[in-house]
Every structure is written in structure tokens, then in C-alpha cells.
Image: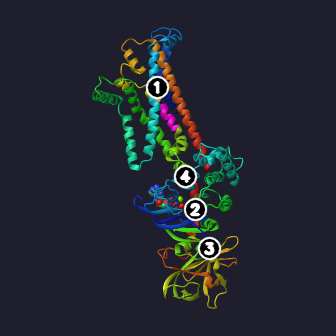
Amino acid sequence: MAKELIRLQNVSMQFDGETVLDNISLTINDHEFLTLLGPSGCGKTTTLRIIGGFQTPTSGDVFFDGARINDVPPYRRKINTVFQKYALFPHLDVYDNIAFGLRVSKLPEPEVDRRVMEMLEIVSLRGFQNRKVTSLSGGQQQRVAIARALVNQPKVLLLDEPLGALDMRLRKDMQNELKRIQQALEITFIYVTHDQEEALAMSDTVVVMDKGCIQQIGSPVSIYNEPENAFVADFIGESNILDGIMRKDYEVEFFGHRYQCLDKGFAKNEPVDVVIRPEDIDIVPPGGGYLSATVTNVIFKGTFYDTFVDVGDFKWLIQTTDFHEIGDVIGISLDPDAIHVMKKSQYSEQFGDYSSYSAEYDEMEEDPEGEADEE
Amino acid sequence: MKRFTRIFTVVVFLFLYLPMIVLAVASFNKGSDIGAFTGFTFRQYGELFRDSTLLPLLGNSIIIAVVAALISTILGTMAAVGIHNMRRRPQAMAMALTNIPMTNPDIVTGVSLALLFAFAGVMLRRNSIMGFGTLLIAHITFDMPYVILSVMPKLTQMDPDLEEAALDLGCTPVKAFFRVVIHEIMPGIISGALMAFTMSLDDFVISYFVYGPNFVTLPVEIYNYTKKPLQPKIYALFTLLFLVILLLMVLMNLLQLRDARQRQIRKGGAS
Ligand SMILES: Nc1ncnc2c1ncn2[C@@H]1O[C@H](COP(=O)(O)OP(=O)(O)OP(=O)(O)O)[C@@H](O)[C@H]1O
Ligand SMILES: [Mg+2]
């Protein structure tokens, strides 16, 4: 089975008395593609810097291959980093940038040459070796940064939002490229992003973080299908999150209806959060015992419609390929596997229906521009 | 209005450069009377280069300026790196401490250094320790703040990830400095060194208090000359000195300009 490579054990980090990481424990296996996912300021970079050795945790231990490495400086760790803003050496050309690590470890020059050329091939930058790094495009600089780290054949590669500065198309290409490289070279990747789609598409394991705490660790599928609390459900994909009561195992009640579900192990009549993904909802003709809803807004999204409906005073989002007029009354049918029940958490009251949806939408639109302005 | 500012600019520049122009003209004057230009000649320059006392003095000045600039550049750069790596509070304090000697009047610095050396002489049971050593120490003392001040901004402008990238790729902190950081701050080091050199070359006040009879620099000796009537070949010497320093300043500005342009390119390339 998978072998443990890195372990964070009860790691906390404080800056000037402010807690940035709160008692984090995490195990990373050999050859794993693990992603740290969370909103800005949740402590992803800090976690990565602790693993890389650029920061010493205030408390807790870091293990590498079973040995405690809290006090091992970065230059003695078999770990390399791809920095968020590339951090290429401007006084060196592409070739010398990539050769940097090999020359520091005093490899014979023919060996350096062989490995640099091989690396240039892997990141598709053959013929660029004599270019100044300042004359490269963002995507090319990105690939030099990856090559410069990978050429040292590290056991672990740390990547801090490596695709953050690239446009959408290039981003998708580089995602595939990175995944291919990771599988071909069998290196452990620890990847930081705040883009949930990217995390789901690339990772073996996703670690969802918020406010310095780990919210959930799991495969992309389990994180999406079985979020542990309202934060994860809301952060990963779209979710309708409603208040419910667990009447008994496999039976949950909300909006006065009882539904079959696949969840058990709750106390009798325990208040719970119920997650229903917008694409899991079936629309049926109204009446006949189904929940009835009124369509309030429809947005065409290409392959489907975002259809907003009112159920009482609760706004739902439904994703459907069928078009419904605003004002239509429809029925809502829910299969047992469309319903996911979660324990109540500190996040329960913060996330709910889609009455604030438009505001959320604006934020997403503004985000990339905000980043571009910073440059 | 526009005309007025233009005239004003000309007046200011005249005011700044007129003394130098008068000096330069005087150095080419055939006659020795400053009041009348009687013909153009290089004679004073010829005499200057045949002079057996002035030239060695110039040599002394250059030696002290080069050695002091070299040592203060090394020490100053090291100090700047140290200050840069401090936490915020001690860093502000260190910078304040660096700035104070620069605003100190030269004469105060000179007198206090002289006192210090006299005291050290007594401690060492020697009559006087004034000489090359004391002069060098004094020059390094007043040069170093200029180096620190010109290296510091380069360190703060530098992307801190660059140093971490070097560590990440296997460099010890010392190796990271020589392989990466020094290239980034080189423009600051060079302009710091040039500044230190010119400060040393033309320093008179501080040197006057700490020089010894065995090693005299040009400005100090010229001051002793001025007690007698000034020989015209001194004009030639001053004109040459002025040109050398002017050249250094132009060089420094060119370097800064080039650095700024490269920074611009780098920014353009990254976005
Ligand atoms: N050296 C530091 N000194 C003080 N505070 C710090 C330091 N480094 C990080 N922080 C704080 O720690 C918190 C977490 O920072 P971190 O960079 O880990 O977030 P992040 O998850 O990487 O966010 P982003 O997605 O914006 O990069 C932030 O509030 C940040 O201000
Ligand atoms: Mg970050």
C-alpha cells in the first residue's frame, strides 16, 4: 500500500500572537498528488512553507520519511518548490536557471547538460535555453520554474498556486501538463490552489482548509459527494443547504416532508444540515405530494440552465437542461442519493439558500481582475 | 511664466557651476593674474605632471580613497544585509543609527575621531598613532553609511522569493548571497562604492584631524599651501579632480538609469 512520506502532527503557527494554523495534522503519501484548497488567507502558503522549511512551526512536528525535520533547513530537504511568482533568477538565462540546483550540488557538467536538456524537453521549451528569463511569457516562465525544481529529482514538489497568473486556456493546458509530469516522474506533488475546479480535476487527495483549520481530507469524489460540513459543501461546487431533522436512520425531514436518504448514525430527531446539489434535483409536474416551487429566475449557462425557484421563503438553485418560464410552478423530486446529511457545525448559519446568490456571483466575476491589478 | 522658469534655471546652474568655470579658465591662463585672461596654454598642466610633491600626494589621496571605498563597500554591504534581515523595530533603529553620522557636522566627526585616536595612543603607550591607519579608519567610518544607504533600497526592492528559491535549490545562506542576492543588489553596491570613493577623495575636514606627518592626502596639503600664495598649477589639479568626479557621477547616473530600465523590462515581462 501507499507509503507515508510527510506527516504534519498537531502543527500550529502563530504570527505576533495571531493564530494562522490551528493544530493541523496531515499525512502525505509517496507519489500522491495532494492539494491544499481554501479561501485566501486560510493558511495554505504557510502550510507549504512549513513543509519546505522556510518557516518553523510554533508548535507541533513535521516528519519526512519518519524523521523529524523541524530544524532541518530548506537546503537540506529533498523538497523543491515552484514559487507563486516563479522567482526565476533574472541574471541567468533559461539554461542556467534550470542548471542552478545541479551546479550547486556540484554535478559534473556533462551530467548537468544531459539533465537540463532532458528537462527542457519535458516542459516543451527546447530551443529556449539561451533566452533571458525576463523575455519569456508568463506560461514559459512558469515552465522554467517547474523545470528548475524538477531537474533536481526531488522526492516532493511544492507548488504554490503555480497557475494563478495564467489565463484560462493556458491554465487548462498546464493542468494537464502538470498531471502528466507528476505521473511520468512519480513525484509527490503538494499543490496549493483556491480554485476548486482545479483541485478536483488534478488531485488524488484534497485538503479543504478554512481559517487555519482543516475542514476535510478526502478524494475529490468523496469531498464533493460527502462534504462534512456546510463550509465544504458551499466551497466545493454549488449547494442548496437546508435545515433538517434526522427522524431515524435513512430518514430525514425538511419542509414538512420526510425523505429516504443514505445517511445513518445520527441521534433520533437530531437537527442536521441537508445538502442537495443543484444537478441532482429532478423537476416533475406540480402536485402529487412533491414539494412545489415557483420559478423566479433562469440563466442560460450553455449546456444547462441555472433555474432559481422559491420553496416557501427558501431559494433553491436547480441545474436542468429543460427550460422553465419565470412564474412557472413545478414539483421537486429528490432521490435518496440526491440527499446528503451533515452534522450541524459552526458554519451552519452562514450558508443556506441562494437569496444572496447574485452578490456571490459578482465577487467571482471581480476576482480575476483584482488579481491582475495587483501585478 | 515659462520664460521666467527657464531664466531662473540658467541662473541656478550658473550659480552652481560658475566657480568651477572660473577655476578651469584660470588653469588655462597664460598669465598668473586671475583678473586678466592673457592667452590659452596647457603649461600649468605640464608643470603639474612634473611636480614632485603634488603628484605623490594625489597618489596618496587615490590610494586612501580606493582602499577606504573597497573596505567600506564590503563592510557596508554586510551591514545592510544584516539590517535587512532584522525584525521591523530593530531595523528602524539601526537605520536611524546609520543616518546620524551622516548628518553630523564633519568637524564634530573629525574632532571626536581625533580624540578617540589620541586616547587609543595613550592606551597603547605611543606618542602618536596618527598616520595611514587612522586616516583609513576615519574614511571607512564616514564612507560606510553611504554604502549602507545605497544598498538598502536594493535589498528591499528584491523579490524575497529569489533568496528562498536559492535556498530551496540547495544553497546555504552564504552561497545564496553570492550566487543570487549579490547580482540583484549589484547596482546599489557599485553606486555605494563610487559614492564612498568620491567622498574619500575630496574629504578635507575629517582628514585634517586624523592625518599624520607620514601620510598626507591632497586636500589636506593644499590647505597648508593656501597659507602661501596659490600656484596656478593647483588650478589645473582642481580642474582635473573636478572632471574625474564629474565623470564618476555621470557613470553612476548611467548605471542607475540602466538599472531602472531593466527593472521596467522585467516588470513588463512578468505580467
Ligand atoms: N510572515 C508573516 N507574518 C505575519 N503574518 C503572516 C505571515 N505570513 C502569513 N501571515 C498571515 O497568515 C495568514 C495566512 O497566510 P497564508 O499566506 O498562509 O494564506 P494563504 O492561504 O496562502 O492565502 P492566499 O490564497 O491569499 O495566498 C494571513 O492572514 C497572513 O496575513
Ligand atoms: Mg498563498
Q: Are marks 4 and 1 in contact (CB under 8 Å)?
A: no
User: Which residue, given by chain and number where applicable, does mark 3 sit on?
Assistant: A221
As drawn, is A288 to the left or to the right of A231?
right
Q: In 3D space, how far apart are the residues under numbered discs 3 and 1 (Cα atoms)? A: 76 Å
Q: Amino acid at mark 4?
A: Asp
| Dot label at residue A190 | 2
Rendered-image quadrant of the N terminus of chain A: bottom right
Q: In 3D space, how far apart are the residues under numbered discs 2 and 1 (Cα atoms)? A: 63 Å
Q: Is residue B254 visible?
A: yes
Q: Secondary structure at mark 3?
A: helix
What color scheme is it?
rainbow
- In this rendering, the answer to whether A285 lies above or below A16 is below
The reply to whether the magenta stretch includes residue B185 is: no
As drawn, is B78 to the left or to the right of A321?
left
Q: Chain of mark 2?
A: A
- In this rendering, the answer to whether B222 lies above or below A22 is above
Residue B214 horizontal/vertical position (percent): 38, 19
Tell me the magenta residue range.
B187-196
Name the residue: 64% across, 67% down. Answer: A201
Q: Secondary structure at mark 4?
A: helix
Same-chain check, marks 3 and 1: no
Q: Amino acid at mark 3?
A: Val
Residue B203 horizontal/vertical position (percent): 41, 26
